[in-house]
Amino acid sequence: MLYLLCFVAGGLASLSLPPAGLSMAFCTFALPLSSSCTSSSALKSGAIIWFAAWGYFSVSLYWLGSALFMGPEIFVWLTPVVCLGFPAFIALFWAVPAYISHRVVSLPMLRLFILITALGVSEYLRTILFTGFPWNAPAQSVMASLFLAQSAAFIGQHGLNIIIFMIAGSVVCLYHRQQRAGLFLLLPPLVVFSGAIMRISDAPSLDSQKDKGPQIRIVQPNVLQHEKWDREKRDGHLRDMAMLSASDTPVPQLTLLPETGIAGRWPEEAPLVRAMAQATTAFDGYLIAGIIGTDTSDSKTKFYNSAIMLSHQGVLIGQYDKKLLVPFGEYVPLRGIPFIDAIAGPSDFSVGKTHPYLTAEPFGSIAVFICYESAFPDFLARDMPKKRPDLIVNLTNDGWFGHTAGPWQHLTQARLRAIEEGVPVMRAANTGVSAGIDGYGRLLGHIPLGISGYIDISAPPVLPSTFYAQNRYLGISLLIIWLNIGLFCLVRKNKNGQ
């Protein structure tokens, strides 16, 4: 019964994430936290958190199963593996810290402080191990409040993960009548959230920024996933995108088409792509579009999930090849197993080696995130830590998610990246949710899920570099130090009590 309750508590905690956005729902995670810290064995402690994490990820990632029904082939038999097995694997990232904390110390309050620290570190590891899968980090629950979301400008997603676990931990302390420990855990969230409120209070109004920057047209074609690579329908899809791009004048200086918006190959189909550039841009404009890039320089052709930037005249300004690929979506880590090869097909995408920066006036330096890359904090810092863009462009195809919570969760991640970096984000999706986002994470406009259309956004200016952008890991380091101070005080208190 306890394990079932913990699974339910984890599922309820996931309601803190979009689209529900009930931030305080994560406090239900206090139940498994308390039960884990007071359990009779390390194995049971880990199992309690594992069930809670399994509930959290199973409920929040239910939409993964929709991808099995969106393509030309349907793999119904994989639904349990994707919807239950994958979340069960991710849950190990939270279960292992619980097991370790129980083995290290014997007192519940000491275990709690160690567990909160270890969970924060484990969430960081979730972004880098096994190619990384940082989707639905607890930090994303703050996005329900634009005021609290500004915390990301100071401590980023990694720091916010610890803050959220601290809040849940404070509930545990209050339940166990450890008021001082509870207040100790609540102090950093109060400090960080106070700074966040001050940041947004200084933000200029959205109306004051309208029509001041260069114009960008974001196109959402809403092509059905099972039709996307249908050669017989491609001309119609391209014609529809061209009409959306040029349906209103004046045509902005930059047009964005989504991930693989042009269902073709570059440079093999260069004439087709150049024709699209002329059809979708003004005489002095630029097109950034997703396409499949190919490299035939070696004996074996390599394929890339690419973004290309062309002038109106069809001149290639730059190309970016995606670096962070989706496991089992864009490449298969278990090649050689017969049934895996049968499902995945004969080839994978290759990891890109180019920098995600394109340049064009009057937009300056443009960083490109392709789909999954927007889920990763510090993606820019990994590649070129000293270079800061003036604009981030996120090309994606959320058609795989269907009409589920997935597209809204993906949008939230793009908004969090905008706040962390203080850089506006322009997001073009095949379907849902295309949007313009300023450096405060505010929506400048959006195209709803499942709608074909376009939106013109005036690109806001880049904000001054955030504390987080300048000090990537200082925030999380200070929080870990604070937790260690609390741990030290609890140890001393316990010794003095004895």
Image: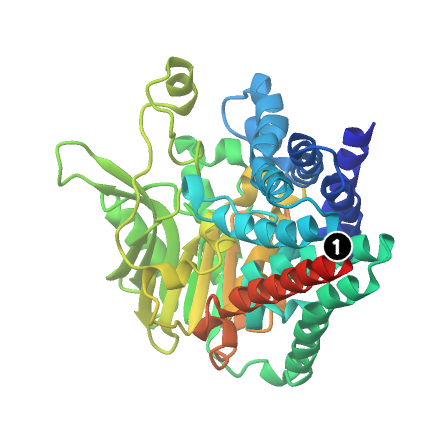
| Picture coordinates of residue 206, whole percent (x, y) | 64, 79
Apparent side of residue 317 relative to residue 285 in the rendered image (left or right) = left
Which quadrant would the C terminus be assigned to in this image? bottom right
Q: Confirm whether residue 484 shows in the render.
A: yes
Residue 77 picture quarter: top right
The residue furthest front is 498
- Please state the horizontal and vertical placement of residue 126, each as a whole percent of the image: 50, 46
**Local SS, label 1:** helix
- Badge count: 1
Q: Is residue 253 left or right of residue 4?
A: left
Residue located 60% across and 54% down the image: 117
Residue type of the residue flagged with mark 1: Ala
Closer to the camera in the image, 36 or 148: 36
Rendered location of residue 437, percent (x, y) = 57, 67
Name the one closer to the observer, 89 or 326: 89
Q: Residue at x 59, y 43 (%)?
A: 97
| Color theme of the render | rainbow
Question: Label 1 neighbourhood size at 10 Å, few (<14), some (14-19), many (20+)?
Answer: many
Depicted 116 relative to depicted 203: above or below: above
Residue at point 77%, 36% (across, down): 6
Left or right position of 279 against 94: left
Q: Which residue is mark 1?
A: 168
- Residue 16 in the image: state x and y as whole percent: 74, 52
